[in-house]
Each structure stands twice: as structure tokens, then as C-alpha cells.
Amino acid sequence: MDKKIVLIIILIICTVIVLSYIGYMIFLNGNGVIKLNKKVSKLQESLLNDKDLNFAREEYVVFLSVSDSKEKAYVTNGIGNTLKEAIDNAKSKMKVNISLYKINPEWVRIDVVNKEEVLKTNDLKEDLFGSENEYRKGLSLDKNYDVALLENELNVNKIIDYKNREINLENLNKYLNSENKNLKGIDNLPDEFISFSCISYMYDEKEVYRLGIESENYGRKEEKDLREVRLIEIMENASEYLIDCVDENGKFIYRYNPLDDNTTNTYNILRHEGTVWSMLEVYKITKNKELKENIELATKFVVNKSVKDKDENTSYIIENKNNEIKLGANGIGILMFIEYMETFNTDEYKELVLKLGNGILDMQNEDGSYYHVYMYPDFKKYEEYRTVYYDGEATFALAKLYEYTKDEKYLKAAEKALDYFYENNYEKHKDHWIEYAVNEVTKYNPKKEYFELGLKNVRDNLSTIVNTNYCNPINLELLTVGLEIYDRASKNNIFIDDFDVEDLISAIYYRADYQLNGLFYKEIAMYFKNPSRIVNSFFTRDDDFRVRIDDVQHNINGYYNMFKNYKLIEEYSKK
């Protein structure tokens, strides 16, 4: 074939490919704009019908955030004499972004400034005092909102320096200059700021919903009622994150840092075991095949990497990074292995749990207390006391081991531990593991002192639990297990002074809802670097929004207990 003809054919093919690509990009951009228009229209409709929109400015200020669910949200804002005009102005800017960056607007959020306050620099310093990432308002650096950021933008991009209680100009300009914001940087910070809060709505792949306006649940989906179906959904979604964290050897990604989309190399075998235990709880409800496969991998990881025999009858679970033998690791290991065997109807780890139980007995003192840390490989004592959690974990495990084997020595040891806890007022520790231990032992020995310990653990700590400004998931575990103890105590005609079950029920509902402030809803996840990786997992706000496997585990445990006791909670609610 003539070389000239071949060249022409190649040129035609290349032209077709280029034109097809251009056409496809035009289609995508056009489709993106159409989808944006549709979603914004629905959001605008909801806003116009919102009775809480208490407009106090001469002009409306609107923020529009858009993400494809895989990358960090793009944020624009607009001002107008009407709500529609302000939205249109923000939308016009967003259309430019869609064209430039080929954005598919899967998640669209609108925030309308509803309240504002002028703050001098010293006033702002005072407002920023407190826990890290807890400033829950937006800030504008000028009265026209030319340089203005939502609270998510401020915290996710570390624009607020909480240590020095000031705005970090370097981080601010870095974010302003990014394609996600696309604004000019500034040379100096102003002498005063406008602090603002918003009425907000979100449109995800399926629906429009309103976001909270109260301080504790500001900017996240309003959950009307945590029914059983929703509790299952929360647990199942969270378990999907855990599935994604398990590698081919059964090891978890222990900690994920959503601010920079990186992981850390630290590890904790005790938390590994607890996480598998929570996954087993979810599996009992969902029967998810992929979840089962990862549970099996993660369980075998413990056996292959951390179980060490002291002798033919005694075993310990080792923390490999420092060769520590932690009392709690044996405790949670027993819970994990027994739950595994009961869930999958096997006796695969029967011999192992007996040897781990003997390891706990070896660490128990004559008075019922425990020695907390030995060292491997010589099995010598290293640290007498580390954390109260180990005490409850070990005692709960011994009681579960009795349930599994019916061997009295395990129950006697658990009772001896509870006697020690009672005599030493362990309710002062506000420990959920003690509550689990009391609940398990009283199934077999309804001793008055044990019930008193469990009930005091709720009563004496209830006010602190309710009023704590922190999404600590172990609080929900303590409360829900405490209700089981109260119910059993009542049936045994055992009561303590000043215990109000109505207050306990109210606290369960309140903490179950408050705990959701640590859930990565789409409307929160969208501002991070890799939203799809973290959505529906749980984070710790004051530690750079970290997601650690035990954060997810304890949230699952709490909601599982609530699900398991839902009818009991309802029954006492009606009373």
C-alpha cells in the first residue's frame, strides 16, 4: 500500500479518536451540568420551604459544594438579593469547575448563611479555645464573603491553628489557591471576621435531606428515629470499611488519616481482636459472605502471628512490636474465638481458648485482682497495672469461657474478680468492660453485690456520660449493657437508691444519636481527599479526624447492643 495512503488513514483514525474524545468530554460536561441543575433545583425547593431560614442580611449568601464521591469537594459561593439569585451565582461558578475538571456531581450540598456575628481577632481567639477541630462555624474574612469558608473547609484543611488559637495563613492560602476553591490568596489576615452558621441540605445519589443546625449535630444528616432497620444499616456500612482494611494476610490497616489519605504503621493486636469480634456481631445479622471471608483471615492472623505457648496447657497472645503479653489481649482473644466458634458452628479453637483462659488465671492474684503485663519469651512480670480495661476484659472473657465450657474454675475466677471490683468501688472508673463482665456473671450468679456494682456503674456516671461533649462510643456500650443488668436485677428484686431507669433510657437514645456526630456521612466525607474510602466509617474529630479500627469496632458494638435490646428499650420507654 502506498505510504501516502497509509499516512492519510492513520491521520483519519487519529482525528476520529480526538473528535470522539472531545465529543465524549462535551457529553460528560453537558451531562454534569444537567445533573447539577437538576439537583440544585431540588435543593432550592427544599430551602424555600424551610421555616427555619431566618434571613437576617440584606443579601443571601450561598455555598455550593460538589463531589463525584471519589475526590475532594469543589466549593463555590454566591451572593444575591434573592435566594435564587445567590444560588444561580454560586452555580455559575460551579459550572466552570465542572467544565475544567470534568466533575460528575454525585453529591451536592447547599449551605445558606442563616446567622452571623462579627468577631474581633481576640474574640475569635476566645472562640477557638477548646478541643481540636471543634470550631463548628464558618468564617468570612470580609463582609462581602469574597473569602469565606465553611467549617468543614476550615477544619479539614487545618486552616485553624487550635494550639495558638489563630488562622494559619499559609494553610489558608494553600487551600484558596487549590482547584477545589480557586480563589486568590491573601497577604494578611483581617482585624475582624464574620462567624456564620447555615441552613443546609444535601442531595446524594438518591435523595434530598436536611442537615442538622444544633451545635452537636451541626452539618450532618438529621436522624429522625434510630429504628432497628437503621441500626443494621449503620453497622453493615461500617463493616464495609473494615472489610476494605483487611489485607491478604488478615492484618488490618490499623489507622487511616483522612486529611492526607495515608496510613500509619502502628498496630495493636488487642484492638485487632476486638474489631474481629464486632465484625462477627454484624455477620450474625447480615450473613455477608465477603465479611465472613475477612473474619476468617483476620482470625487466622492472630493464631499465626501472635499466639505463643508457655506450656502445653497455657497460651498467651503477644504484641509482636514489643513482645508484650497484655492481660486484655488474652481476654478479647477469648471473646473473639468463642464468638467465632458459636457463629460458624465449629470447635476449631476450643483447645486454644482453654489455654488462653489458663493464661488469664495465671495472671490473676489471690485477692481477685490481676497482673497486667508480662514479657515474652521469658514470661516474666513486667508491669503490674496499665489500664482498668484489662480487668473487665479478662473477667468478661472468663465468664464467657464458663458459658462455653461449663468449667466452674472460670466462673469462680470471674466471681473473685468481681468481688475485688466491688470492694474497691470500680464504678469510679466508668468502664464498659466491667459492665460486660457483671452482665455475664449475673446470668449464673445473681449476687446482690454484683448487681449493685453494675447499677452504680451506670447511676454514678450517667450525668458525665450524657453531658460529655465527645463522641465516645464506649458510653453507649456501658448504657445498653447496663439496661440488661437493670432488667435482670429487677427480676431478682434487687434495686439501688436513686437509680432512674427513665433517665437511663433517655441517655441511651441521646448518646446513640450523639454518637453519629462521629460518623462520616457523605456531607462530611465529601470535603476530604478520598471520600469513598471513609464514607460510613467512624472518626475521632479531635485527632485529625483519624479512623482507627477500634473507633469503628466500638461504634458497632454499641449499636449492636442497642439493636439486640431494642424491644427491651421500647418496653421501658413505654413504662
Image: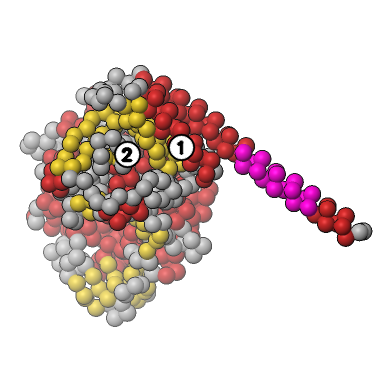
Give the magenta range: 11-26
Tell me the residue at 23%/70% (across/down).
373
Q: Amino acid at mark 2?
A: Asp
SS at badge 1: helix
**What x and y, as percent, mark residue 386?**
19, 65
**What x and y, as percent, mark residue 568?**
28, 32
Q: Which of the two residues, 250 or 456, is positioned nearer the viewer here?
A: 250
Tell me the residue at 33%/36% (across/down).
220
Which SS type dominates the magenta stretch? helix
Q: Amino acid at mark 1?
A: Met
Q: Is residue 21 left or right of residue 220?
A: right
- The answer to whether residue 412 is seen in the rendering is no
Find residue 146 and name its label: 2
Residue 516 location, quadrant: top left
Tell me the residue at 91%/59% (across/down).
2
Q: Is residue 167 left or right of residue 48?
A: left
**Do labels 2 and 1 touch, CB within 8 Å?**
no
Find residue 94 and name its label: 1
- The answer to whether residue 120 is seen in the rendering is yes
Q: Which of the two residues, 424 or 243, is positioned nearer the viewer here?
A: 243
Q: Residues within 10 Å of mark 1 (few under 14, many from 20)?
A: many
In the rendered image, residue 15 lying in the magenta stretch gets the answer: yes
**What x and y, as percent, mark residue 535?**
42, 45
In this view, the residue farthest toward the right is 1
Q: CA distance from mark 2 to mark 1?
A: 15 Å
